Image (cartoon, coloured by chain):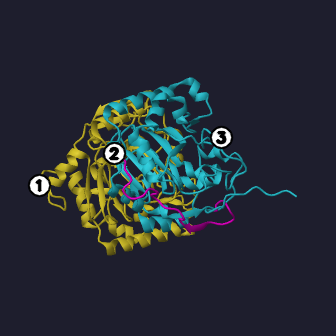
Chain colours: A cyan, B yellow
Amino acid sequence: MTIAPERTADLYPSRGTSEVITPRKDPVVWSQSGAAGPFQPSELSDFERDGFFAIGELLTADEVAVYRTELDRLVGDPEMRANPRSIVEPKSQSVRSVFEVHKISEVFARLVSDPRVVGRARQILGSDVYVHQTRINVKPGFGASGFYWHSDFETWHSEDGLPSMRAVSVSIALTENFDTNGGLMIMPGSHRHFVGCAGETPKDNYKRSLQMQDAGIPSDEALTKMADKHGIRLFTGKAGSATWFDCNAMHGSGDNITPYPRSNVFIVFNSVENAAVEPFAAPVPRPDYIGAREFTPVR
Amino acid sequence: MTIAPERTADLYPSRGTSEVITPRKDPVVWSQSGAAGPFQPSELSDFERDGFFAIGELLTADEVAVYRTELDRLVGDPEMRANPRSIVEPKSQSVRSVFEVHKISEVFARLVSDPRVVGRARQILGSDVYVHQTRINVKPGFGASGFYWHSDFETWHSEDGLPSMRAVSVSIALTENFDTNGGLMIMPGSHRHFVGCAGETPKDNYKRSLQMQDAGIPSDEALTKMADKHGIRLFTGKAGSATWFDCNAMHGSGDNITPYPRSNVFIVFNSVENAAVEPFAAPVPRPDYIGAREFTPVR
């Protein structure tokens, strides 16, 4: 007689035969109130309410220059272009994203362990944290596509195996985000419900979904209800500004026909108490440069 | 011996072997200062400087409801769908625009001759005016494409034969224009230079260009210079708001992933003293439901 291995309970079913919307079962801010760190208590309350918090200047102009240079180096490197970590824009054939930059760049590794960065992640997640994903993104001007509405957690749960909503992202602008160049849009408060999406995960979905989304997309009806209830906030800000947002915030971005590229560095922290298990709705986990399978805390 | 017919001089060459940028040779506001009408003198000065003027409430909410209903009727009519005046969105196969609505709808015919509308056009163009083009546009939510940067005059001159920059457009919002649903973007002051674009006009270009643009597109370099010099203004406003803009203003719009369609009615007035001649850079004029060949003044 064999005993089936213990499976982690699936709190957030998705990719089934129909769309199911369920209330969030996890806290948003996991630390005790008053936990020391860069966030003020009122800022943590705002994050809890809205599912995001924007910081006007997380990095100085001098620091931005350093990260911009490093981004340009990675994106322009012909060897990196051939690396599976690099995602190429279908239309222009230029590099749109490079994953796991904290592993391949000392400069970005330092950013991840910067107390202004990891300190805030620890406050939100109430524990030590590890890096689930990093990437640099370039949305070139003159017509680069945007990203359709999605909850990151839906994918990280279904395809990477994060059990609970105990992960947080920070997107740090390395170019100015205008109201015209395809900035991040979030529905404030949308993090309090989980949209379990209809449709099975295709095999090797990640290869297509990083360029073009298919699985894990909410219905028009669900998006309409959520937008009517929550509204849509467009984020603008200088280079060096940052948006912290909950793993389950419904977000997306439009295309960019302006001449101004929108570049950022994106870091996802997960609690060490929420380490990835087997994917909840995919045959195998995505590659570890997209969803980490090693859970060493950031120090 | 045959005598060649007299050709109108081409003040704005385009669609040649290379891109050529030339200063505007025409006034922006053609009426004497102080010409009576709905525009205040200071508003006409703003229009002259910026190439546009936005009006918070051109139509009342009750009027908007009437025009919205008429738009819905036309867009939803299966017969209209088969009419060549209707343009169908490639992705969703839904009707995106219907041309010449003032000819097929009494409701929109009344709007064209409304003194708040035609009165302003006469002030800008300094003469009696006729309708060069009308259309209703629906940019549905959930991913409708935008329109890339262009000067309308570049097309109206090259393909319809308008000799001079003596035409003006008004775009009247029939739904709210948010900062997130693909609103009109204009480069303020861009109307003072003409970008003569590189590339010959393909045969029957209009059939493709109304869905997807090819000819008449400025280079990345020209757009960068213009955006750096002028900036980019995104227009937002309630249903009933209107944007008047010069025929040579460089403008475009992004896509719309929000659930909120962006619908408007668009009217182009041309001066009766600037009536269309033979196209300046196309073998034959576009169909007259796109560019009028009949020049009866609006009364």
Residue A163: where, in percent of width, then height? 61, 56
Q: Is residue B81 above or below residue B167?
A: below
The span from disc 2 to disc 3 (Cα, nearest Å) is 33 Å
Q: In this view of the protein, can residue B58 be seen by the observer?
A: yes
- Residue A64 position by quadrant: top left
Q: Residue at x 34, y 45 (%)?
A: A237
The amino acid at mark 1 is Gly
Residue beneath disc 2 = A237
Q: Residue at x 21, y 52 (%)?
A: B126
The span from disc 2 to disc 1 (Cα, nearest Å) is 42 Å
Chain bearing tag 3 is A
**A44, A2: nearer the viewer:** A2
Residue beneath disc 3 = A287
Residue beneath disc 1 = B34
**Element type where label 3 sits in the image:** loop
Chain bearing tag 2 is A
Magenta stretch in the rendered image: A13-37
Q: Main secondary structure of the magenta part?
A: loop
**Element type where label 2 sits in the image:** loop
Q: Nearer the viewer, mark 1 or mark 3?
A: 3
* Crowd around label 1: few <14 · some 14–19 · many ≥20 (10 Å): few
